[in-house]
Amino acid sequence: MSSRRVVITGLGPVTPLGIGASALWTALLERRNAVRRVQAFDPSRFRSQIGAEIDGLSIGDFVPKGYRKAAKIMARDIVLAVVAAHQAVSDAKLRTRCLLERGEAAGEPNLDSTRFGANIGAGLICAELAEVLRGASVDGQFSFAKWGTEGMNNLTPLWLLKFLPNMLACHVTIVHDAEGPSNTITCAEASSHLAIGEAFRTITRGAADVCICGGAESQDNPMALLRQEIGGRLSTRNDAPEQACRPLAADRDGTVISEGGGLVILEALEHAQRRGARIYAELVGFGAAHDAYVAAQPGVPHPEGRGTAVALRKALRDAGIGPEQVGLVASFACGLREHDLAEARALQGVFGAHAGQVPVMNIKAGLGNCGAGSGAIDFIAAVLAVHHGAIPPALNSRPPDPACGPLNVVTAGPRDAAIEYAVSPAYAHAGAQNAALVIKRFRA
Amino acid sequence: MNRRVVITGMGWVTPLGHDIESVWQRLLRGESGVAPITLFDARTFPTRFAAEVKDFDLWRFLGDRYAAHQTCSRNTGFALAAAEMAWRDAGLSERPDVPPDMIGVYLGGGEGPIDFANFVAAAIAGWDAEKRQLDAVRWAAVAQERLSAVREFEQNPNCAAGHLACRFNAQGPNFNTLTACAASTQALGEAAMLIRRGDADIMISGGAHSMIHPLGVTGFNRLTALSTRNDSCVTASRPFDRTRDGFVLGEGAGILILEEYESARRRGARILAEVLGYGSTADAFRVTDMHEDGRGATAAMRGALADAGLEPPDIDYISAHGTGTEENDKIETLAIRKVFGEYARKVPISSVKSMFGHLIAGAGAVELITCVLAIRDGVVPPTANYREPDPNCDLDYVPNEPRKANVRTCLSNSFGFGGQNDTLIIRAVA
């Protein structure tokens, strides 16, 4: 059991550029850009007033009818995960409880629910409290006495459950009846990769046959925007939103807030073959690491991208390949001064002379950074690139930053490419966790 | 062939103290860490008590290294102190022979307590009472003025794991899980899997959390999950007792050093126990309630037994999740009965939450440490405050007095809100 092969059979991206694998892929090939002035709230007091948002999501389209009322206790992050789960499971043609009850699949379940795991990355979900807190104020000051006697009673009894990070996995496992090994990873931008990597190991060791994994987060709210802003991570190109997020470009000045993520279906090869599933690609390598670097300021990465390099090397070793065999790097850079540079330095270190040749894909310019969900979208795009044999162009990555060294960032095209192996790194902007995944073109 | 995983060091910061031996003795005496809340003004809250960590001074644990970590949140401080203890307890030097990228961290780390006063000030200023919505412009004006970049950064749940990596130069796999009350059992289980698989040789693992803050107590009070026995708070945590009325919030950290067996032996490490089995499941049932048949809890225990290659009678002691809520204790008892059959009545079961309170994400780690100590000393800690038997909880909960027993193999349960279930099995190493 210890050497079971794991394949990717379902993709469920939920992004400002589209919901579902084909919508996202089309948008990437058409060079679309979702960054705009923030509309969810009035951003005019913030220095960065732009971001990528998802319009018109209705949870009722993605859950069984009887589950719609649960939407009341779902923070936006949870809604995103539930939508992503529906997309991934439908795409994989898994007949789960949700799809059977919704009439979107017929017959009996085609998987054992106790062998169906979930591994989902989540962020620090922002609590909405202004109304009840103000209700507990006296002369504009918060009063503990008033809070305890009346304020808190205005909160719905299940209020806390709206914001616990494991509620993404909780709702997804209920809706799709996934009773197998389950986990919630909270490592900011590295979360999705760590979750996918852990699910990969779970299937490999035989503890599950199918896992739904990835992550989701919404930063499309004032608190999340403020956290990014005071952390100095946001672009202020408010007058040109579509040009604001400039991964790896010399003139990058920060990223933009976003919301979204994705869940994917990982499956033991023999399980996928038995049910005749479409196989997008094979997952063959995972590596995880930490910068272990005490910076002068919190949130600054190791200048040589040490953690990213260690994660990449471990993932390549796990896949049993050398860097020269890699045909695509799905860059995680999202326009940050120091992190983009650290990633580039890590790629230089790992790929050596090959660094200037290997095609680099970057999809962040039109999407921004959605925290724990970011990595899942990158991973999905990399899987689609391997599957379709094409690399969508990076927007806004010119002029290149000489400090990043020679990198073959694909900016024209889309370019056709037969990719045997693709590697997708990710790292937490605050917290310095790193991970990398290696995807291989599927051959039976 | 699978690599074996052993425990070589332990440390904790708990409501009963901050070193292994004295706290263990207090647990065996059935002492309680519960008292009225001092961390904020809870006088009008339905629950006005908790098991707080007292007299904690991070500098005492870190010394010269304090400066590199002084901005950390309360829970991260607990994790750092417990990890210092565990690292020393394991006899690991500042530069162990294991390569840095084979040393990792896997925590069940909670989020840091929010910057309450400043958060509240912005919320009050930002609420537009006429439109009944947040005025983001007014909110931001106050928030930009009052919220601190460092404090917001340190609040992230992955920051404790980051601090530990920096302190111990742990460049290997670094994870944080936050599966509510199951988190640190899950972290330890997954950390063991990383070592087994060869992804790491040493893992610093466990959990840390503090939810003894206004929003934490509010949230659990609204869920009616907390005991409200304000007039007798010291004995309020009553797992498996008929008069139980909810759990008691605790805080703190438990950290264990997990090591690959051969590598630990080579360096002559003292081996405390072996991590033998791990099971993880989801109830996939309801957001609030456990499955009424204990479906997920049963599957987690069975999964851990299968992983360990053991049968139910091989288990000498069960460290229960035992929160003291009506539902948990009843369903956990049912699940133990289902898994253990007739043997369920014979195996001693206890809940140290009766004394520590519930450390939430940190609970499973401090409870696993008590399992290691039970093996070492041949004594099972009691379930304190146990007075009145409940017909729904009819097993041997080791009431009030510790019990001498030849404990070789322990099973430890943790179940989280949202239906997350995790079980670990550890065994003495001859």
Image (spheres, rainbow, N blue to C red):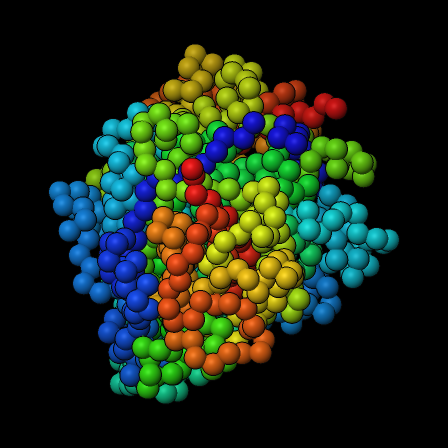
Residue closer to the observer: B31 or B109: B31
Residue beneath the point at 36% across and 38% down: B271
Mark yes or no: residue B147 visible: no
Residue beneath the point at 18% across and 46% down: B62
From this view, report whether residue A430 is shown above or below residue A156: above
Q: Is residue B80 left or right of residue B405?
A: left
- Rendered-image quadrant of the N terminus of chain B: top right
The spot of residue A34 in percent (x, y) is 54, 47
The spot of residue B199 in percent (x, y) is 47, 31
Mark yes or no: residue B413 visible: yes
Residue B345, quarter of the rendered image: bottom right
| Identity of the residue furthest to the right in this view | A107
Residue closer to the observer: A308 or B261: B261
From this view, report whether residue A132 is shown above or below residue B1: below
- Rendered-image quadrant of the C terminus of chain B: top left
| Identity of the residue furthest to the left in this view | B64
Residue closer to the observer: A367 or A176: A176
Q: Is residue B356 left or right of residue B290?
A: left
Residue closer to the observer: A91 or B82: B82
Q: How many marks?
A: 0
Residue beneath the point at 36% across and 87% down: A149
The spot of residue B395 in percent (x, y) is 54, 68
Q: Is residue B269 left or right of residue B261?
A: left
The spot of residue A120 in percent (x, y) is 55, 49
